[in-house]
Image (spheres, grey):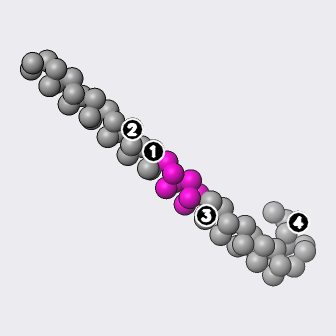
């Protein structure tokens, strides 16, 4: 009986870890997309404001 209880606890821990890693990865994807969008906006702004010769120096 003790062995069975122990196994259940291990399974619960594993399931919890899987669930939390899934939530983390979906949150990270969302943040990454938002960051990507901001980065794109920022680079567009910079490109629009910089004179052409400065862009070539990069």
Q: Nearer the viewer, residue 34 or 39?
A: 34
Mark 1 and mark 4: span between their CA atoms?
A: 43 Å
Q: Residue furthest front?
A: 1
* Magenta residues (range): 25-32
Question: Relative to residue 47, is residue 22 drawn left or right?
Answer: left
- Labels 2 & 1 near each other (Cβ < 8 A): yes
- Labels 1 & 3 near each other (Cβ < 8 A): no
Question: Relative to residue 26, is residue 16 drawn left or right?
Answer: left
Mark 4 and mark 2: span between their CA atoms?
A: 48 Å
Q: Which residue is mark 2?
A: 18
- Sequence-earlier tag: 1 or 4: 1
Residue 5, above or below 55:
above
User: Where's residue 39, x and y in %?
Assistant: 67, 66
- Which quarter of the figure has residue 11? top left
Please report the residue visible at 88 percent of the width from the left and 66 percent of the height from the top. 56
- Sequence-earlier tag: 1 or 3: 1
User: Where's residue 42, x and y in %?
Assistant: 70, 73
Q: Nearer the viewer, residue 55 or 48?
A: 48
Q: Residues within 10 Å of mark 4 (few under 14, many from 20)?
A: few
């Amino acid at each position: 009986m003790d062995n069975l209880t122990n196994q259940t606890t291990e399974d619960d821990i594993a399931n919890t870890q899987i669930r939390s890693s899934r939530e983390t990865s979906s949150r990270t994807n969302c943040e990454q997309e938002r960051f990507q969008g901001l980065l794109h906006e920022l680079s567009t702004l910079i490109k629009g404001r910089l004179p052409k010769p400065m862009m070539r120096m990069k």
